[in-house]
Image: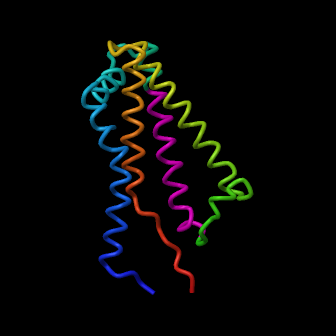
Amino acid sequence: MAQPTSSRLHALSRHTQSQLKFILPGIAVTYLFNTHRVFLSLLTSPNPDDWSRSAALLALCLGALVVLLFLYVLLLPWLQGVEPDYRSWRKSGVLSWVIPTLTAAILAGWSLLSITLGKWTNLGYLEGTIGASGLYALIFGLMGLLPAPKIHRT
């Protein structure tokens, strides 16, 4: 039986409110520390042999891997035609490698971004770590707003 429109909107707004707990602080920290511009300046450094540019590029690649793996997990029910049991992900053929890879990519990407912002910018290590956390919180909050496809069983 389909839910009434008002209850679906209420559930959507509740979910959106929970995601705003990540999005709003992420926007605030990114804006206050100007993290996006500082990171972009590292990526567009005129010195191609510079370690800062290489570290920033690797951090960007790890961040892109996180987004791609998250989208893969989100679209997995649609791709396979069956909804996986996320609670017993270790027993799943696909999830048993995607979840650990996603976790490792999050840890490595966030750590490298924190170190890169701390070492090669004027932010320093504390503000670089806060800035990296803000960017990751913003991205996770925005990805959490994506609707998961539902498999309709007949």
For the N terminus, the quadrant is: bottom left
Spot occupied by residue 57 in the image (x, y as percentages of width and height): 44, 27
Q: Nearer the viewer, residue 123 or 1?
A: 1
Q: Is residue 41 left or right of residue 126?
A: left
Q: Is residue 17 above or below residue 110?
A: below
Q: Is 93 within the magenta?
A: no
Q: Nearer the viewer, residue 140 or 18?
A: 18
Q: Quadrant of residue 81?
A: bottom right
**Magenta segment, which residues?**
57-80
Residue at 44% from the left image edge and 32% from the top image edge: 60
Q: Is residue 99 above or below residue 151?
A: above
Spot occupied by residue 80 in the image (x, y as percentages of width and height): 60, 67
Residue at 51% from the left image edge and 61% from the top image edge: 75
Q: Is 66 within the magenta?
A: yes
Q: Nearer the viewer, residue 2 or 143?
A: 2
Spot occupied by residue 13 in the image (x, y as percentages of width and height): 32, 62
